[in-house]
Image (cartoon, grey):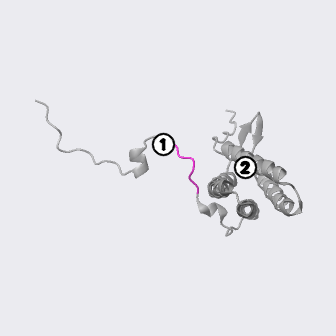
């Protein structure tokens, strides 16, 4: 007859996610501290200002697009733009936080991309979004704005995807 042991070791403490989703590799986690302007590093401050500028301009253009849809009287466009604006805000916020917090280098098509490359991308992204906002009021055109808007969304998502790759290990010659 087999008996059940009375003295079992204690179970390890784990979170709800670890118990219910073992092996889950969540990628949509980031801290809002990635957008904090309280830092002593001037490069981190410039990086965060570019991130906030990009996110702010995207939000402003989403709100303008919402009002444009409301003015046009298209209920479907109004609903679509409002849902897309909310989803887009959080997705782009996550992407920019990933880019802003990236450390190390990644090989992309044989080229090493490091912190400097991600900083240049954030600066150019902020600059382009300010241009989109100016273009909205100076006649960029609805189609040109939509193409550049979604093109930047795809580009931001692609760079954020690259930052999820494991950083390259430095070469050691022993």
Q: Is residue 142 above or below residue 172?
A: below
> The C terminus is located in which quarter?
top right
The label nearer to you, 1 versus 2, is: 2
Residue 64 on image: x %, y %: 74, 63
Q: Residue at x 61, y 63 (%)?
A: 33
What SS does tag 1 mark? loop
Residue range highlighted in magenta: 24-30
Q: Which mark is residue 153?
A: 2
In the image shown, does 19 or 87 lie closer to the viewer?
87
**Residue 97 in view:** no
What SS does tag 2 mark? helix
Q: Residue at x 62, y 56 (%)?
A: 83
On screen, residue 128 versus residue 94, left or right, reads right
Q: Residue at x 75, y 43 (%)?
A: 113
Q: Quadrant of residue 37?
A: bottom right
Residue 124 on image: x %, y %: 82, 54
On screen, residue 35 versus residue 126, left or right, reads left
Bin the neighbour count of mark 1 within 10 Å (Cα to Cα): few under 14, some 14-19, many 20 and up.
few
In the image shown, does 31 or 166 lie closer to the viewer?
31
Q: Which residue is mark 1?
A: 24
Q: Quadrant of residue 22?
A: top left
**The residue positioned farthest toward the left in the image shown:** 1
Sequence-first disc among 1 and 2: 1
In the image shown, does 83 or 43 lie closer to the viewer?
83
């Amino acid at each position: 007859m087999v008996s059940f042991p009375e003295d079992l070791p204690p179970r390890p403490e784990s979170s709800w996610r670890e118990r219910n989703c073992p092996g889950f590799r969540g990628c949509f986690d980031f801290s809002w501290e990635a957008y904090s302007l309280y830092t002593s590093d001037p490069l981190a401050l410039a990086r965060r200002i570019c991130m906030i500028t990009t996110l702010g301009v995207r939000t402003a253009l989403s709100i303008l697009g919402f009002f444009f849809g409301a003015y046009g009287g298209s209920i479907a466009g109004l609903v679509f733009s409002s849902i897309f604006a909310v989803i887009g805000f959080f997705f782009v916020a996550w992407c920019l936080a990933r880019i802003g917090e990236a450390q190390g280098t990644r090989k992309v098509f044989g080229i090493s991309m490091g912190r400097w490359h991600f900083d240049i991308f954030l600066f150019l992204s902020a600059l382009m979004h300010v241009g989109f906002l100016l273009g909205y009021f100076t006649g960029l055109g609805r189609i040109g704005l939509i193409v550049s808007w979604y093109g930047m969304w795809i580009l931001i998502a692609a760079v954020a995807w690259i930052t999820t790759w494991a950083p390259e290990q430095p070469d050691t010659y022993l």
